Amino acid sequence: MVLNNQNQQPLPTKITSGSLNGWRLQSTNLSLPEVHGSITVPVNAGFWRKMFAFAGPGYLVAVGYMDPGNWATDLQGGAQYGYTLLSVIMISNFMAILLQALAARLGIASGRDLAQACRDSYSRPATIVLWLLCEIAIAACDLAEVIGAAIALNLLFRLPLIWGVCLTALDVLIVLFLQHRGFRYVEALVVALILLIAGSFAVELWLSQPDALSVASGFIPRARILGDSRMLYVAIGILGATVMPHNLYLHSSIVQTRKYGDTDEDRREAIRFASIDSAVALMFALFINAAILMMAAATFHGSGHQDVAEIGDAYLLLSPLLGTTLASMLFAGALLCSGQNATLTGTLAGQIVMEGFINLRIRPWLRRIITRLVAIVPAIIVVVLYGERGTTPLIVLSQVVLSLQLPFAVFPLVAFTSDPEKMGAFVNPLWVKVLAWSVAVIIALLNAWLLWQIFAG
């Protein structure tokens, strides 16, 4: 038995599929059992009270869509290609809203997170392969967070990069403390940091004064993105930084922290509120990512600084180009908030995929240290060999790696939520099936195109 953090009532350690008989295994462990069903949802309450009860998981998911990996790709895209890749950010964000809604639907309707659903549906060898691919994706994401936080510490406090990289390992203490206090504390910290990031970039946009007509034109998709291999590389890096595979596993789990009823009506209501929560949160991510690219386009593109791709260079140039040191300070402060925010959700995602795929449960602090070491070792090697100049290309590469892992999370998610035997009354309607499969195929084709461009020279 596991104790509920808020009322200390015992929670069951197993869930059953009930009327859903499409799963190979008919029972499984609770996802994140220490916080499962720990947040009460008022029964006889109005829309806004229930919305507040369900609000939170979407913002933890949105954190992954505004981490330092996004900064590197958005800065590079804006500096080199102006506002052209705004359309990629917008389309990627809409894809993310759809896929995260499917992840929430899977978790609430089946009582399984995406990793558990894979284990309950596929053979052991297939499950192991998917687990390893997911671990690679998490390590790539964690790598971007490590480097981003280290760069921010260097810019703000002149802390050497190698020390900043090592210092990021200590964030495990923050995660452990917040989890002990309760899941609402994790959500509150994440939302506060998101608001700080959004406020910083609202000021940055005001200072950089992007051209409104060019911004509007940038949201129109351009066919030439597919024909330019370098632009396509950055575009798919943006896609990988925006639609993140481990967020699908994370969201399908943390929506189950709400204590909703077991009836179809209760679950349908929970799916609706969870979808609204994630859609609103991801619109914040759209604003922040678009703001980074617009700031880079307005400040660097066309001003003789199109080659700016390093976060450190952007920091140094913002003050003289915008005429105030506030621009650089806000930029670095927001970067630090972004890196720390992403590490919180990375911890949870790592725990979810390890427990879900291979049913291996280890202490969260140990899991976090393992994940951090996987990210810190290559980061230290790059910093020692190439210094700061090697960090941004490594971040962009990590986002491309994330994008290449996406189909291995997206295809199972779409297949599960489109299967009436697995989802029962909560199966995707026809229009959602068509849209979801289209998104999955587009992601796979873009990745295939990228690989062909790379290996064809």
Image (cartoon, rainbow, N blue to C red):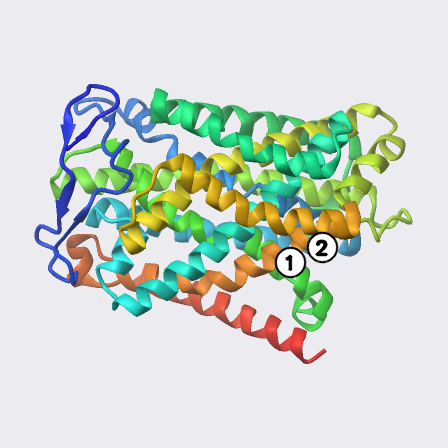
Is 159 placed left or right of 123 in the picture? right
Is 282 placed left or right of 235 in the picture? left
Q: Position of residue 414 (x, y in %)?
A: 33, 61
Q: Position of residue 335 (x, y in %)?
A: 66, 34
Residue 52 in sight from this viewpoint: yes
Neighbourhood count class around disc 2 (C-alpha, 10 Å): few under 14, some 14–19, many 20 upward: some
Q: Residue at x 19, y 41 (%)?
A: 267
Q: Position of residue 386 (x, y in %)?
A: 78, 52
Say which element carries label 2. Answer: helix
Q: Residue at x 61, y 71 (%)?
A: 450
Labels 2 and 1 touching (C-beta < 8 A): yes
Name the residue furthest left.
Answer: 19
Residue 428 in sight from this viewpoint: no
Viewer-proximal residue among 2 and 336: 2
Which quarter shows the C terminus?
bottom right
- Residue 239's tag is none
Neighbourhood count class around disc 1 (C-alpha, 10 Å): few under 14, some 14–19, many 20 upward: many
Which quarter shows the N terminus?
top left
Residue for badge 1: 397
Q: Looking at the rendering, which quadrant does residue 179 occupy?
A: top left
Q: Residue at x 29, y 41 (%)?
A: 272
Say which element carries label 1. Answer: helix
Q: Position of residue 213 (x, y in %)?
A: 74, 46
Residue for badge 2: 393
